[in-house]
Image (cartoon, helix red, strand yellow):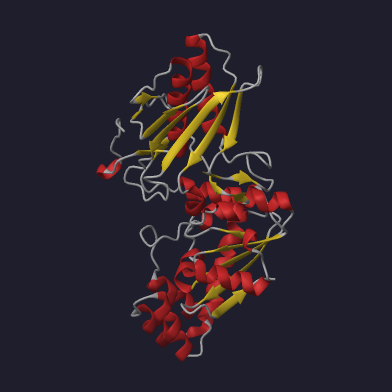
Amino acid sequence: MSSRHAAGGGLRHGWTTGACATAATTAAYTAVLTGRFPDPVTITLPKGHRPAFALAHERLGAGSATAGIVKDAGDDPDVTHGALVSATVRPGPTGSGVTFRAGPGVGTVTRPGLPLEVGEPAINPVPRRLMREAVAELAKTHGAPGDVVVEVSIEGGEELATKTWNPRLGILGGLSVLGTTGVVVPYSCSAWIDSIRRGVDVARAVGYVHVGAATGSTSEKTVMDLHRLPEEAMLDMGDFAGAVLKYLRRHPVPRLTIGGGIGKLVKLGDGHLDLHSGRSQVDLAALARVVAAAGGGARLAAEITRANTALDALCICREHGFDLGTLAARRACATALDVLRGAPVEVDVVVIDRAGVIVGRVGP
């Protein structure tokens, strides 16, 4: 594959699954019309990029053709990096236009709330548009009607999907064919935030009145067990507390439980909405002042100032009989309500230690 380019800091951009599927579709339909596969095959992406993709495999049959491309996600730690994305194109009924099918490794939508109807293959709207445009251009060039069935497959996709949010979103049997620009930006937050939004959409569509959002797997299990929430009601918040709260402000669910470790939720209480360690830090001096103002006393405040971490501060507070966990929960809840700006969402917060023991809780 060529036309790879560098992102900031020298990291290489890559190409989305949708871009790979579009290139494979272009190559396969060209072969249906001409008997020859273009290799490499060049496509045009929404922002004007024109990447060229080398074919990893090709097969021409009676009235159909299959082309495959190995996805290169650049320097992004994408679960689908190196996956073989294939498209099989065959003629469809007259007047049908382009019809999409889920081949092996591509999921099927089983719940409402996603930008696709239930029962549809999990090929998102922009990749569908790109593939339709590619088919239309080739059909015009070769005087063909452009009525085709496009079946997209991803080798090993069913297993890879277990490492994504698809099962929780009700996309079963494989991966989604994604991409709004066709370009994978290394370490971009956009895919994670998009999954948070789709999680909220699905929860609302199926009628959940209580969702959970956790900073990690331990806090997620704690919230699920505490409130007997199904996995499908859990939003994959991670460090993106702001993304959860801002989307719920516009698309409310009646109740939200936030769960997390003491360090992450102290940061949320300080007003940080991105909880990643590289983008926000626990301010122990500020925490000491908060504890002192809450009645912890000057001696305890001084010890907190000298602590190594928020967890260390929690242990120090325990020795002094001061409930730092509940204070952290109360402050985190206040930040969440401030971001929600009066949206009809009740919030409760659960703070855990490293072992998953609840050390603070506030809310309904």
What residue appears at the point 66 percent right and 50 percent down from the top-left corner? 202
In the displayed structure, does residue 205 sit left or right of residue 40? right
Q: Position of residue 349 (x, y in %)?
A: 60, 69
Q: Position of residue 16 (x, y in %)?
A: 43, 38
Rendered view: 343 above or below 124: below
Rendered image quadrant of residue 103: top right
On the question of residue 324 being in view, the answer is: yes
- Numbered-mark total: 0
Closer to us: 14 or 208: 14
On the question of residue 247 being in view, the answer is: no
Q: Which image quadrant: the N terminus?
A: top left
Rendered view: 210 above or below 157: below
What residue appears at the point 65 percent right and 48 percent down from the top-left corner? 201
Q: Position of residue 289 (x, y in %)?
A: 44, 75
Rendered image quadrant of residue 283: bottom left
In the displayed orientation, state which residue is furthest to the front. 62
In the displayed structure, does residue 222 sit left or right of residue 52? right
In the displayed structure, does residue 8 sit left or right of residue 133? left
What residue appears at the point 68 percent right and 70 percent down from the top-left corner? 228
Q: Which image quadrant: the C terminus?
A: bottom right
